[in-house]
Image: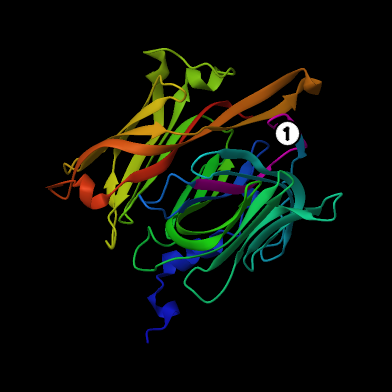
Amino acid sequence: MVDKELAIRPNQREGFDLIWRRFPERQIKSSSVWWYVMLMPKQAEGYGPKQAMFSLNCMAGDTFTVNERRHPGFNRTPHMVGEDEHLNTVALGWYFDGQKTYKKLVHDSAPAVLSPNGSISGWKEGKDGRRYGGSFRAYGDKPFGMLGEFYGSGGGGVRFEAWGDPSSDTTSPGYVYDYDFKLAGFHVVSWRNMHFVGEITSPSGSEFVEGIGYFQRVIFDVPLFPWRWVFAAFADGSVFSCTIAYAGLHMLRRKDDVYRAPLEDAFLPINNAGFFHPKGADEAVHFTKAKVTRHSGDPYPAFSVECSNDEGDFMSFQAVPHSHLQYILTRPFFGGRWNSKFNYNEYPFRMAELEGVINGKMIDPQALGEGFGNCEYTWGLFL
């Protein structure tokens, strides 16, 4: 039997260890840190339409609001490397059970401890004697084993075990993106295709789930600014994702109504990339150009997704949402007379009209099976 530790590459082990760090010496007044997991349970058609999201979030500064609920920020004071850190976190979670979306499953703030030994944990005791909040921690003896737990005053939560596969950087926390200038930066650890099993509880009851998960630890040492992000999983286990971060008039938008064409797509891309990882492949196919275009729809907008590279690989499809989640973040300035505002939206979707060429071969939609995913669409500026 092969020792699992011997099969783990150094960058993968480093990525897993970096999940439990936040680099306070780099952080600025508008910094934020997010630990985020998306769970896509296996069903008859593929990894959807059921879908869930749970996250622990912390923001620098005194206070901020999420959907008009005020929460405390955290102190940016540097600490000794290797010591536990004390933060204030907000646990958020929603679940689409295939028919109904439970939008406020978890929304609770709590003091938290970030341990370099492998955990971020934020809990508080409610008036009913139950604990509310969430945690992620290293767990078990499987490669990159992780245990996630969230319970909310909204009547539900999740407990799941996740693990990875060292055969690729997509199926392990092996993708680390580090962009550091003196006045701004990002640090991202992405685990883009993990296995999970667990139980999700909502007001309608509890159910066992297993499937594909997507996990990130993201540090923004810069004000939050607009992006469009897409992740999708196919029935055969292949995954796709693309990201577009951009600057433009969308930073000034404060209302829910969107710009009409051509202003809607008039922006300057800052980051523009994507990938497709076929099931079982050692490496992903990377795209250097990405485009996500919003179209009007009822009751939800649709999105056209296109990715390509200079080697002739490309993918395109329509993301047709069946639900919508929204978190509006504000931070007060000038004694509360003005707020910076960031509008974060998620659209769980079913894929349609898939086309593409990968490694010189036409994509076979029937072989991949049904595709389900999530499209993030944001605007505003969170200072």
Number of dots carrying numbers: 1
Residue 352 appears anywhere in the view: yes
- In the picture shown, does residue 61 fall above or below 114? above
* 81 and 269: which is toward the camera: 269
Which residue is found at the position 52% from the left and 49% from the top? Answer: 187
List x then y, in percent, for residue 381.
58, 26
Residue at the disc numbered 1: 64
List x then y, in percent, for residue 201.
63, 53
Which segment is the magenta one? Answer: 51-69
Residue 75 appears anywhere in the view: no
**Residue at the extreme front:** 204
- In the picture shown, does residue 74 fall above or below 193? above
Q: Is residue 300 left or right of residue 370?
A: right
- In the picture shown, does residue 312 fall above or below 212? above
Does residue 56 show up magenta in the picture? yes
At label 1, which amino acid type do we have?
Phe
